């Protein structure tokens, strides 16, 4: 991009001026104070440069009696090789304006539209124009200023001018990246060390937390074991109660069997007793019968004996007492009447009565005969009585035996009834115990179900191998351990996991930082080598041209790279020696003003073919030169521009001859405080 024209309005000594520029070399000349340098300053201000030469504020550049100044650049944007320098602006010309106000405000306009300084700088940077670089725009006195710059500053300006800043930026970027990685590595190492210490602390706490969790788990298991031990205890109680109930029921059934047997035995004994009683009654009746029979026989015997005695007495007293005999007979009859079966006696009595009634002379013999017969009957009665006595004795013995058996039966029945009563008493007791056990069983089952339900809430049933007291003791010991860990909170696990994760992340980050450090070192090394190679190649070319130019000025010199292994310390060393002197560094103490100007311009001319900016300018470069060097530099300027696409602006107060078709000469004069422009060629 080339400047077609610069328009100055109320800018410094210019009220209004339009200065046309052409491709190639544009030379502005004129006496001191005419406004030559103001043109370059106007270009710089329009391009956004902060340098203001004599002024500290942009408002000081406004013409003394005006409130506003304008500097406008008409830039060429025509197609070259079918492409515009600024493709996004589809016009052959771009108008860039900067407006300055007395109140200190200023702004840019691009094609009469407001634009920001950043936008303007971005536009110019794409075109390679850097108005701040003195190797591109070298204002008045900057030739001297260049010599006092450090070698590092000179090298940076060269890099910016030729467009090699990116290499330095790449190296700096890689170094910053490395520095950042190293710093990051140090930070990570510190963090890792701190995290490791913290992690060790939390690991100890985590171990305590795990111990607490194990104890809590153990306690929950012990509680579970305790609840199921309670269940087992109650189950055992229920089983014991059921066994007792079963025993009671078995006892009741056994008692019922024994009761049934005893009842049967009592029934049998009572039946036998009844039989014996019946037998006893029968025998008793038999005895009574025998007793009655015996009494009858005894009575008959007694009567017969009495009758016999009476008969004997009657016989003895003969019939003297017949009346007494009759009376006795009557008495005997009375007795006989009371006797129900006095068959024999009645018979004898009848015979006695008949004998008595028919008493005759033979009565005595007959009476004796009857007496004998009575004796025989009496003997018979006595035999019968003996027999009856024997029978009665036998019956009495039988009765006695029966009584003994009956008493024995009674005794057995009483014993059996006592046994039966005892059995019933035992049965009642067992039934009462059974009822109580049933009641207890229901209570125990209810308690068991509740305990089992609570136990199921703690987990599935487990085999219990310890007693309840052992479990309770173990719970008590576990609670003691847990009490010692009461300060351990559940947040410890989260903190430990967090710091473990952080430690692993930091460890991984440290590993990655180490890898990145190696990569960054390799990258710095590679980029540094690339930068060193590029800069050496550049300075080799520049050095060659520089030495050729100095040879024309009858001087020797050299351009080289110093401290090339440290990009921050690396610098551009310009050596020069005039009049056969050994080359020494270019500075403000060794060479004269003309020598410094000549050497500086020689370096600038040697560098020109590598500068990428389409516009370059230098102001009053030849102030301290001798005429010969001034003419020589002017000639070299013309030859440098020839065949180049760049646009050059040279400002000089001297009367120098610039010969060539590409030279455009503009003169500036100041008339009554206002600068005027005149084109010469």
Image (cartoon, helix red, strand yellow):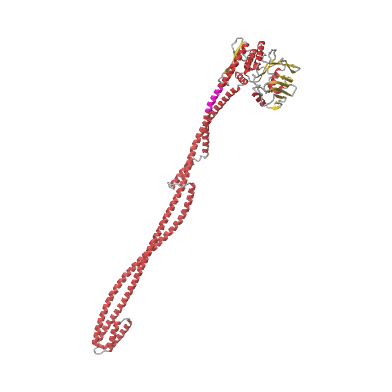
At 63% from the left and 11% from the top, the residue drawn is: 552
In the displayed structure image, the side of residue 365 where residue 430 appears, left or right: right
Instruction: Please identify the quadrant where the C terminus is shown.
Output: top right
Tell which residue pokes out farthest to the top in this image. Answer: 580
Question: Looking at the picture, does residue 515 appear above or below residue 142?
Answer: below
Can residue 419 be seen here? The reply is: no
Tell which residue pokes out farthest to the front in this image. Answer: 82
Q: Nearer the viewer, residue 308 or 144?
A: 144
Count of labels shown? 0
Tell which residue pokes out farthest to the right in this image. Answer: 672
In the displayed structure image, the side of residue 553 where residue 223 appears, left or right: left
Question: Looking at the picture, does residue 251 appear above or below residue 471?
Answer: below
Image coordinates of residue 163 in percent, x first then y, are 62, 21
Instruction: Please identify the quadrant where the N terminus is shown.
Output: top right
Image coordinates of residue 647 in percent, x first then y, are 67, 19
Image coordinates of residue 184 in percent, x first then y, are 55, 28
Quadrant of residue 582 within the rendered picture: top right
Q: Nearer the viewer, residue 612 or 586?
A: 612
Question: Looking at the picture, does residue 304 appear above or below residue 557?
Answer: below
Q: Nearer the viewer, residue 426 or 481?
A: 426
Image coordinates of residue 63 in percent, x first then y, are 73, 21
Tell which residue pokes out farthest to the bottom in this image. Answer: 361
Can residue 239 be seen here? The reply is: yes
Magenta region includes residue 525: yes
In the displayed structure image, the side of residue 148 where residue 291 appears, left or right: left
Magenta stretch prevailing secondary structure? helix
Give the residues in magenta.
515-528
């Amino acid at each position: 991009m080339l400047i077609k024209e610069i328009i100055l309005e109320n800018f410094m000594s210019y009220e209004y001026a339009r200065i046309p520029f052409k491709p190639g070399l544009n030379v502005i000349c004129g006496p001191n104070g005419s406004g030559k340098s103001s043109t370059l300053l106007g270009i710089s201000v329009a391009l956004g440069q902060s340098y203001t030469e004599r002024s500290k504020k942009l408002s000081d550049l406004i013409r003394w009696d005006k409130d506003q100044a304008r500097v406008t650049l008409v830039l060429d944007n025509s197609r070259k090789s079918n492409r515009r320098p600024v493709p996004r602006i589809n016009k052959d010309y771009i108008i860039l304006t900067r407006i300055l106000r007395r109140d200190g405000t200023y702004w840019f306009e691009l094609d009469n539209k407001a634009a920001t300084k950043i936008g303007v700088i971005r536009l110019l940077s794409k075109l390679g124009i850097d108005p701040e670089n003195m190797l591109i725009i070298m204002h008045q006195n900057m030739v001297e200023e260049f010599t006092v710059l450090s070698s590092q500053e000179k090298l940076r300006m060269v890099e910016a001018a030729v467009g090699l800043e990116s290499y330095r930026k790449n190296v700096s970027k890689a170094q910053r990246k490395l520095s950042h990685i190293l710093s990051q590595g140090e930070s990570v190492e510190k963090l890792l060390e701190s995290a490791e210490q913290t992690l060790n602390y939390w690991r100890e706490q985590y171990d305590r937390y795990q111990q607490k969790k194990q104890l809590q788990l153990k306690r929950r298991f012990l509680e579970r074991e305790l609840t199921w031990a309670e269940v087992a205890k109650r189950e055992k109680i229920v089983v014991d109660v059921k066994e007792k109930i079963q025993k009671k029921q078995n006892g009741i059934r056994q008692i019922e069997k024994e009761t049934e047997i005893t009842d049967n035995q009592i029934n049998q004994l009572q039946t036998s007793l009844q039989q014996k009683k019946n037998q006893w009654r029968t025998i008793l009746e038999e005895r009574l019968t025998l007793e009655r029979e015996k009494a009858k026989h005894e009575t008959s015997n007694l009567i017969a004996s009495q009758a016999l005695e009476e008969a004997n007495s009657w016989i003895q007293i003969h019939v003297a007492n017949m009346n007494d005999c009759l009376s006795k007979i009557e008495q005997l009859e009375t007795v006989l009447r009371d006797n129900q079966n006095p068959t024999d006696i009645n018979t004898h009595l009848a015979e006695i009565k008949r004998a008595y009634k028919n008493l005759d002379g033979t009565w005595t013999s007959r009476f004796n005969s009857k007496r004998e017969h009575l004796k025989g009957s009496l003997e018979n009665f006595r035999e019968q009585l003996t027999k009856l006595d024997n029978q009665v004795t036998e019956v009495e013995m039988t009765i006695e035996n029966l009584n003994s058996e009956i008493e024995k039966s009674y005794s057995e029945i009483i014993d059996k009834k006592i046994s039966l009563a005892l059995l019933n008493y035992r049965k009642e007791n067992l039934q009462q115990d059974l009822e109580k056990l049933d009641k207890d069983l229901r209570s125990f089952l209810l308690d068991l179900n509740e305990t089992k339900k609570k136990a199921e809430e703690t987990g599935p049933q487990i085999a219990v191998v310890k007693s309840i007291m052992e479990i309770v003791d173990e719970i008590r010991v576990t609670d003691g351990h847990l009490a010692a860990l009461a300060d351990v909170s559940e947040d410890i696990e989260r903190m430990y996991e967090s710091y473990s994760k952080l430690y692993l992340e930091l460890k991984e980050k440290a590993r990655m930082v180490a890898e990145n450090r190696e990569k960054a070192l390799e990258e710095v090394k590679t980029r540094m080598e690339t930068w060193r190679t590029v800069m050496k190649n550049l300075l080799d070319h520049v050095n060659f041209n520089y030495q050729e130019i100095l040879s024309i000025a009858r001087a020797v010199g050299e351009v080289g790279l110093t401290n090339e292994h440290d990009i921050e310390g690396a610098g551009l060393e310009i050596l020069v020696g005039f009049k056969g002197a050994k080359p020494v560094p270019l500075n403000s103490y060794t060479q004269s003003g003309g020598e410094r100007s000549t050497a500086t311009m020689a370096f600038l001319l040697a560098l020109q073919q590598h500068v990428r900016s389409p516009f370059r300018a230098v102001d009053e470069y030849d102030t301290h030169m001798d005429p010969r060097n001034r003419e020589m530099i002017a000639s070299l300027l013309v030859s440098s521009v020839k065949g180049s696409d760049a646009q050059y602006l040279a400002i000089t107060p001297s009367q120098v001859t610039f010969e060539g078709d590409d030279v455009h000469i503009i003169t500036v004069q100041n008339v009554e405080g206002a600068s005027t422009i005149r084109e010469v060629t």
